[in-house]
Amino acid sequence: MDVSCHSFVRMAKLAAPLMKKGGTLFAMSYYGASRVVPNYNVMGPVKAALEAACRNLAFELGPSGIQVHAISAGPLKTRAASGLKDFELLLNEAAQKAPLGELVDVMDVGFSCAYLATPFARRITGGTVYVDGGTNIVA
């Protein structure tokens, strides 16, 4: 909880005074924040807390022109993910389930964050943005 949620809140509070002309903050979440994902264990409630913290920070920092987004990416091959039991099964299931028919990669997440940091997204804040090929909409 300290590393995956509270540290983001502390960082946001320290960064806000430096963002005199506004800006955008991003936190990485995951589908397990709102649904049970086998073997994700305690990280589900931790990511749910992170998403709630993003909503509260968006409310608190909005008057300063600072947007806050939780990005819920589909499963990505990262060092952290490699520690999850049966991660390959999770990847395969996500690819089969995704309406767009394929897994996302770090570039997809980067493109979404880049968009959210531009004036094109100037009125978007406080939500969870799913970058998962639509996997989150399928039961």
Image: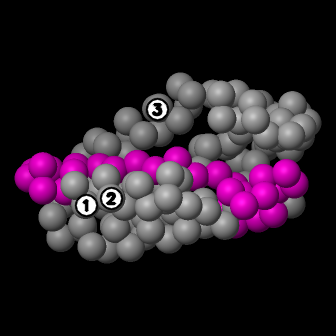
**Nearer the observer, disc 2 or disc 3?**
2
Based on the picture, tell me whether residue 135 belongs to the magenta stretch: no
Rendered residue at 34%/68% (across/down):
57
- Contact between marks 2 and 1 (CB within 8 A): the answer is yes
Q: Is residue 136 left or right of residue 19?
A: right
CA gap between label 2 and label 1 equals: 5 Å
Between 47 and 94, the residue placed more toward the observer is: 47
Q: Is residue 112 above or below residue 139?
A: above
Residue 86, picture quadrant:
top right
Q: Residues within 10 Å of mark 2 (few under 14, many from 20)?
A: few
- Which mark is drawn over residue 13? 1
Rendered residue at 68%/42% (across/down):
74
Q: Residues within 10 Å of mark 3 (few under 14, many from 20)?
A: few
Rendered residue at 79%/40% (across/down):
84
For the record, the magenta segment spans: 15-43
Residue 82, picture quadrant:
top right
Q: What residue is shown with label 2?
A: 10
Work out whether residue 124 can be spotted: no
Q: What residue is shown with label 3?
A: 111
